Image: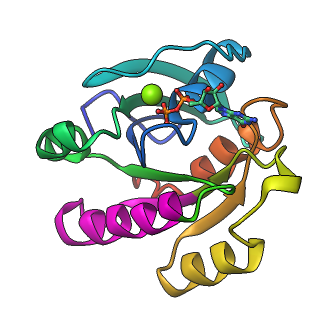
């Protein structure tokens, strides 16, 4: 916690990890700006955006989102982004089994080197591409359950489950005691 969190207003660092092309940047843009840009540019290094949501119990959660580049050449930089993160969102593309395997690498990496109380979410994105699906819902659920993660399938394109993803994460955050 960076100091200006209290019982009513949480501020949390969230890092997005996953293969290049799975839709991490599109998920962030959909959540923060409500937009989908099919011509969005490849993330270089990492980018930063923040968004605050209000929960039903009138608490607010400000997500400080680090959107990383998935490319191998930036892998050595990843610890800079996940250090101190309260939330790790690991994204794969449901049409791409390689990206699902890569997601498992990131889960292990965060389990080993992330904060001990990190909240982890596994996200199967591009759920609008059902006819191209190559990773079953069941495989996602099973892997997430085994690893104590929250699981959801999203579409940054249609906006399906994007807000739900962040709301569910917010509900799972440890609350500072008053
Ligand atoms: P990143 O490298 O993980 O940040 O991936 P991007 O957000 O740059 O997206 C990579 C490509 O996937 C882009 O061409 C997007 O338009 C496309 N894309 C992202 N999310 C979705 C989605 O939910 N559905 C579909 N059909 N395409 C998506
Ligand atoms: Mg990106």
- Position of residue 44 measured from the top left corner of the image (x, y, whole percent): 30, 20
- The question of residue 3 being in magenta is answered with no
Q: Is residue 35 left or right of residue 72?
A: right
Does residue 65 lie above or below 115 as drawn?
above
The front one of 67 and 150 is 67
Q: Is residue 47 left or right of residue 124?
A: left
Would residue 99 be seen by someone viewing this image from the given angle? yes
Looking at this view, name the residue that lies furthest to the front. 132
Image quadrant in which you'd find residue 66: top left
Would residue 116 be seen by someone viewing this image from the given angle? no
Q: Main secondary structure of the magenta part?
A: helix
The front one of 115 and 123 is 123
The front one of 164 and 172 is 164
Q: Is residue 55 left or right of residue 119?
A: right
- Position of residue 105 measured from the top left corner of the image (x, y, whole percent): 33, 67
Does residue 36 lie above or below 136 as drawn?
above
Number of marks: 0
Which residue is located at x 25 percent, y 31 percent? 3
Which residue is located at x 55 percent, y 21 percent? 51
Does residue 52 lie above or below 139 as drawn?
above
- The question of residue 118 being in magenta is answered with yes
Q: How is the image coloured?
A: rainbow
The front one of 61 and 50 is 50
| Highlighted magenta segment, given as a residue range | 98-122
Image quadrant in which you'd find residue 144: bottom right
Which residue is located at x 43 percent, y 21 percent? 42
- Position of residue 114 measured from the top left corner of the image (x, y, whole percent): 23, 60
Q: Is residue 42 left or right of residue 140?
A: left
Quadrant where the N terminus sits is top left
């Amino acid at each position: 916690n960076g100091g200006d969190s209290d019982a009513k207003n949480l501020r949390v660092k969230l890092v997005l990890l996953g293969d290049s092309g799975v839709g991490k940047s599109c998920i962030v843009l959909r959540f923060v700006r409500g937009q989908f840009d099919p011509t969005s540019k490849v993330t270089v290094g990492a980018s930063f955006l923040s968004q605050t949501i209000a929960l039903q119990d009138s608490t607010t959660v400000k997500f400080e989102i680090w959107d990383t580049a998935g490319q191998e050449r930036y892998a050595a930089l990843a610890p800079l982004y996940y250090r101190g993160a309260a939330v790790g969102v690991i994204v794969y593309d449901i049409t791409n089994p390689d990206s699902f395997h890569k997601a498992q690498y990131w889960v292990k990496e965060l389990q080993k080197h992330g904060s001990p109380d990190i909240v982890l979410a596994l996200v199967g994105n591009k759920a609008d591409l059902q006819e191209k699906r190559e990773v079953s819902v069941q495989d996602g659920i099973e892997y997430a359950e085994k690893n104590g993660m929250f699981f959801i399938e999203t579409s940054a394109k249609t906006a399906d489950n994007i807000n739900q993803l962040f709301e569910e994460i917010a509900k799972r955050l440890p609350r500072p005691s008053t």
